[in-house]
């Protein structure tokens, strides 16, 4: 069932890099520059153009607040070391495709339930201040004739993303919208989200100069890293791990980086050793508890407890091709059907 919640100012809490607690202001900025017309522009050309700055969908990543992409991965894209990931629209799991297809319907629902008219902005916009030239924005829609809000951001959330919307607008979306308000000089935006295809919520995000100031500082640091070709700080995400492997895919044989006199590096190494030992101990304890519970379950499929349950099921039997034996009988097949697998660098820890 479609549901519209009360449109209210969205309180925000931000991670360690930006403190976001919006305060309403009436300060107005100069209108954004219309950098390029995107109507009819090919998607790949649009992606290439976005490399010239930080778009609104890049804002949370550049600030280190995107749960799906690290600063380092975005840096690889902006410096041309990695192509922007393009979703396979033929795949059964294609959230970007469905988001694009459903966006007009979300906008239609918004107009119907708010009586606000919306209009597409087919352009990449740029911050009017030359000192913030790296701040770009590509709006979903502008709200026409409303004194209350001027921008509409449409979102869709599936079963996994829905939990991020339980307490209001997710942090990474708030960062995106405040970035849009900064570039355009507008005062407020509505975020309309379709959750799991059947529930719709509308939130209001009001311009906050204090938030924008933090965002500008974080984005300036990131863009300086792009211009200086210097990698930004890394985090613990899977995205950062993949980006590091792509940035440094192979080692130079017999080379050594001597960090023995680097106090900070030695402190990190000592912490790494300690945490490795703690993880090993915790893993051993986890395995022991699991084995003891399995012995209690015996041949039962499921066990229930006061605070939850566990399931212990046998996977279905399957048949696969024994390629090792096949190649022993027909070794020429490896020449006819080769499959190359690139090796990756392994991180091994040794103590003296």
Image (cartoon, helix red, strand yellow):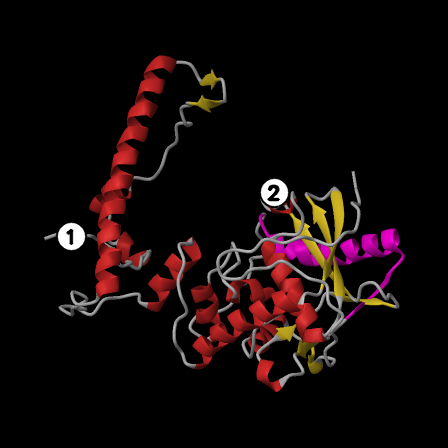
Is residue 350 in view from this perspective? yes
Please report the bounds of the magenta region as a residue range.
93-120
Tag count: 2
Picture coordinates of residue 152, whole percent (x, y): 76, 62
Picture coordinates of residue 313, whole percent (x, y): 42, 23
Circle 2 residue: 163
Marks 2 and 1, Cα distance to the nearest angstrom? 41 Å
Residue 114 placement: quadrant: bottom right
Q: Is residue 232 left or right of residue 277?
A: right
Q: Is residue 341 left or right of residue 170?
A: left
Q: Nearer the viewer, residue 325 or 300?
A: 300
Is residue 85 in view from this perspective? no
Picture coordinates of residue 154, whole percent (x, y): 72, 57
Rate crowding at label 2 as few (under 14), some (14 to 19) or many (20 or more) other CA atoms within 10 Å. Answer: few
Circle 1 residue: 350
Tell which circle, 2 or 1, labels the residue nearer the N-terminal end. Answer: 2
Residue lying at 52% horizontally and 65% vertically, measured from the top left: 63
Q: Is residue 79 left or right of residue 213?
A: left
Residue lying at 46% horizontally and 78% vertically, measured from the top left: 224
Q: Secondary structure at mark 2?
A: helix
Q: Nearer the viewer, residue 330 or 273?
A: 273
Is the N terminus in the top left, top right, bottom left or bottom right quadrant?
A: top right
Residue lying at 20% horizontally and 70% vertically, measured from the top left: 252
Rate crowding at label 1 as few (under 14), some (14 to 19) or many (20 or more) other CA atoms within 10 Å. Answer: few
Q: Secondary structure at mark 1?
A: loop
Picture coordinates of residue 132, whole percent (x, y): 59, 80
Q: Which secondary structure is most common in the magenta stretch?
A: helix
Residue lying at 52% horizontally and 54% vertically, measured from the top left: 67
């Amino acid at each position: 069932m479609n549901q519209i919640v009360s449109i209210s100012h969205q309180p925000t809490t931000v991670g360690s890099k930006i403190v976001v607690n919006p305060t309403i202001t009436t300060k107005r900025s100069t209108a954004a520059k219309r950098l390029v017309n995107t109507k009819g522009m090919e998607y790949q050309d649009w992606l290439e153009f976005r490399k010239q700055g930080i778009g609104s969908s890049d804002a949370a990543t550049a600030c280190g607040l995107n749960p799906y992409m690290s600063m380092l991965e975005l840096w690889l894209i902006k410096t041309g070391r990695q192509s922007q990931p393009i979703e396979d629209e033929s795949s059964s799991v294609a959230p970007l495709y469905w988001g694009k297809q459903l966006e007009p319907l979300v906008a239609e629902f918004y107009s119907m339930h708010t009586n606000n008219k919306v209009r597409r902005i087919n352009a990449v916009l740029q911050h009017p201040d030359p000192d913030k030239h790296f701040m770009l924005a590509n709006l979903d829609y502008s709200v026409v004739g409303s004194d209350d809000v001027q921008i509409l951001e449409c979102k869709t959330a599936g079963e996994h993303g829905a939990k991020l919307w339980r307490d209001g607008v997710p942090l990474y979306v708030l960062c995106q919208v405040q970035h849009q308000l900064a570039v355009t000089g507008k005062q407020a935006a509505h975020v309309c989200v379709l959750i799991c295809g059947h529930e719709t919520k509308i939130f209001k995000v009001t311009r906050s100069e204090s938030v924008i100031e933090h965002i500008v500082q974080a984005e300036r640091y990131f863009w300086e890293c792009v211009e200086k070709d210097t990698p930004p700080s890394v985090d613990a995400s899977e995205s950062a791990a993949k980006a590091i492997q792509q940035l440094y895919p192979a080692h130079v044989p017999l080379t050594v980086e001597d960090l023995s006199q680097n106090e900070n590096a030695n402190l990190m190494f000592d912490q790494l050793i300690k945490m490795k030992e703690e993880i090993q101990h915790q893993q051993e304890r986890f395995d022991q508890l699991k084995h003891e519970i399995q012995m209690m379950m015996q041949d039962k499929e499921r066990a229930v407890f006061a605070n939850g349950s566990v399931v212990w099921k046998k996977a279905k039997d399957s048949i696969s091709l024994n390629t090792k034996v096949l190649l022993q009988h027909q070794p020429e097949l490896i020449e006819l059907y080769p499959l190359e697998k690139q090796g990756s660098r392994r991180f091994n820890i040794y103590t003296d």
